Amino acid sequence: MIDTAKGTTMANIQVSTSGWASPSDIAVSPDGTRAYTANPDNRSVSVIDTATNTVTATVALAVSGSVLTVSPDGKKVYVTGQGMGSVMVIDTATNTVSTKILVGGHQGIAVTPNGSRLYIGQYTERAVPVIDTATNQVIATVSTSGGCQGLAAHPDGTRVYVADNGGQRVSVINTATNTITASIAMASPPISVAASPDGTGVYVGLDSGPVTLIDTAGNKVVATIPIWDAGALAVSPDGTFVYVPDYSTHTVSVVDVAGRAVTGSFAVGNKPCNIAFGPGVPLSTATPTVTRGAPLKVRYSTVPGNVTSKNWVGIYPDDGGATIGKKNSFTWASAPNAAGTVTLDTGSVPGPGRYAAWYLYNDGYITMAASPLTFTVT
């Protein structure tokens, strides 16, 4: 795990390295408290506590899994891999395999932001099966021109972008009809894909070409970035940077999204093969002490699966959340995006003292972080 600050956002980066073992995938829970990594050589999945960076559980699998993803509500981990013949579903409350979904060999996996559909990239079969996660049944199969590798769901859930490796293109699946509605040619076979949190761009790692940026409005290539053989990549939660592990140099390159350029790199463990972000610090402010009546500007961020138009930030007493849902907040503001800034009126608090800003979900009182942003009013 790497802690890195860029701009105003602090985020946890989980990097999977391979050493002598088979390359393994890694994914982070929506609340950022746990990371899951596939161990194909040991037929297991490790559960990592991101606060202590220790393995707290190991989930045994009947077969070797190398690709995984976490459901948007954090209750399930889906594990698969080429030649497995199934998708294993792990219950994160018990850290046990709860379900086995029979479906042919595969190399990529993506879940829609609402968690209702699971898309599987099949290489040999040249197809993308679609699984209804409520019934754990395959409800459609989308044929592709070549073998599929990485997949990424658009943050609004309407599309899934598929690295059609054999067809040397990125295919766009409409999730309402489960048909391919666009096909974008690549300079070489694509391997990995990642969507920006705001949904405006999709980054593609190529087998022997530069990282390629697709504008999702027109499904056209608008830029290339000179990083080669990007087998994996991840966009930061605030959408400002893209991180790309380099298997051969044991480093991770950092791409500035605004400038579309590599701004640096840092060393990691041996042969990094996959990378994933936690949601970062959900709330932050540049002014932890304010005069009563002065505006308090609070930066918020979360993962796409947690985004709703009715998310909000409210000010409460600094009492550990005891009054949340029992008393009205002193003031509040809507936080409808994956990342942004809200302005809160501190003139609404009863007087000087310590207060807490809580990030809350979907017009309710489910907290989006284990702890609030505390600040002082003078």
Image (cartoon, rainbow, N blue to C red):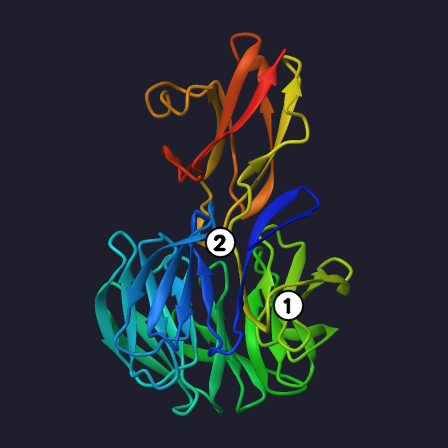
The amino acid marked with disc number 2 is Pro
Residue 82 marker: none
**Residue 198 % position (x, y):** 58, 55
Within 10 Å of disc 2 (Cα), the crowding (few <14, some 14-19, many 20+) is many
Q: What residue is at 41 percent from the left and 75 percent from the top?
A: 66
> In which image quadrant can residue 47 be found?
bottom left
Q: Choose between 255 and 245: the one closer to the eye.
A: 245
**Residue 186 % position (x, y):** 64, 84
Q: Along the horizontal axis of the image, is 93 left or right of 369? A: left
**Residue 258 % position (x, y):** 74, 57
Name the quarter where the C terminus is drawn: top right
- Find disc 2 in the rendering and name its residue: 304
Q: Do the residues labelled 1 and 2 touch (CB within 8 Å)?
A: no
Q: Vertically, is 77 above or below 320?
A: below
Q: Choose between 198 and 287: the one closer to the eye.
A: 287
As drawn, which residue projects farthest toward the front?
Answer: 20
Q: Along the horizontal axis of the image, is 299 left or right of 137? A: right
- Find disc 1 in the rendering and name its residue: 244
CA separation, marks 1 and 2? 20 Å
Q: Vertically, is 140 above or below 75?
A: below
The amino acid marked with disc number 1 is Val
Question: Which label's residue is closer to the chain start, 1 or 2?
Answer: 1
Within 10 Å of disc 1 (Cα), the crowding (few <14, some 14-19, many 20+) is many
